[in-house]
Image (cartoon, rainbow, N blue to C red):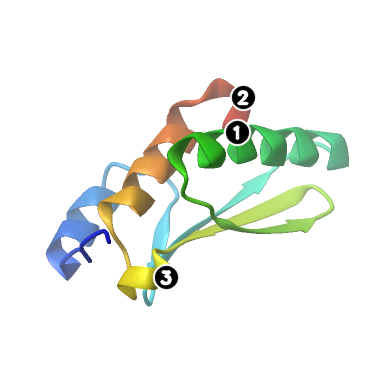
Amino acid sequence: MAERLSDRAVIDALQTLEGWTREGNTIRKQFVFPDFRGAIAFVNAVAELAEAANHHPDITINYNRVSLVLSTHDAGGLTQNDLDLAARIQRDPAARG
């Protein structure tokens, strides 16, 4: 099982993850696209990254807005897996909003 991160480690990491915010034991970000197709293309790109990492976000789709929420449920909070996946999403051109 992945080790839960300290508050300081999460705060420091969020400084490098544009637009991601902490909410309790999660980090989240909302992405906005020109239309529904753009939102779905983004979700599909995130799905590929999540499968490769074997770490899956909670995803909410509202027409052209997609919200991602990351947390490591079996650790009861945030782990390096969450920060790593957020960074991969941020770097991948197909997974940007």
In which quadrant of the rendered view does residue 41 lie? top right
- Confirm or deny contact between disc 1 and disc 2 (CB under 8 A): no
Instruction: Indicate the secondary structure of the residue bearing disc 2.
Output: helix
Q: Which residue is drawn at 76% across and 56% down?
A: 61
Specify few, some or many for label 1: CA neighbours under 10 Å numbering under 14, 14-19, or 20 or more: few
- Label 1 vs label 2, nearer the camera: 1
Which three-letter amino acid code belongs to the residue tagged 3?
His
Residue 47 horizontal/vertical position (percent): 63, 40
Specify few, some or many for label 3: CA neighbours under 10 Å numbering under 14, 14-19, or 20 or more: few
**Quadrant containing the N terminus in the rendered view:** bottom left
Disc number placed over residue 65 in the picture, else none: none
Disc number placed over residue 94 in the picture, else none: 2
- Is residue 11 visible in the rendered image? The answer is yes
**Relative horizontal placement of residue 78, taking residue 45 as reference (left or right):** left
Residue that numbered label 1 is attached to? 48
Which three-letter amino acid code belongs to the residue tagged 1?
Glu
Q: Residue at x 55, y 22 (%)?
A: 93
- Confirm or deny contact between disc 2 and disc 3 (CB under 8 A): no
Q: Which residue is drawn at 76% across and 41% down?
A: 39
**Quadrant containing the C terminus in the rendered view:** top right
Which three-letter amino acid code belongs to the residue tagged 2?
Ala
Instruction: Indicate the secondary structure of the residue bearing disc 1.
Output: helix
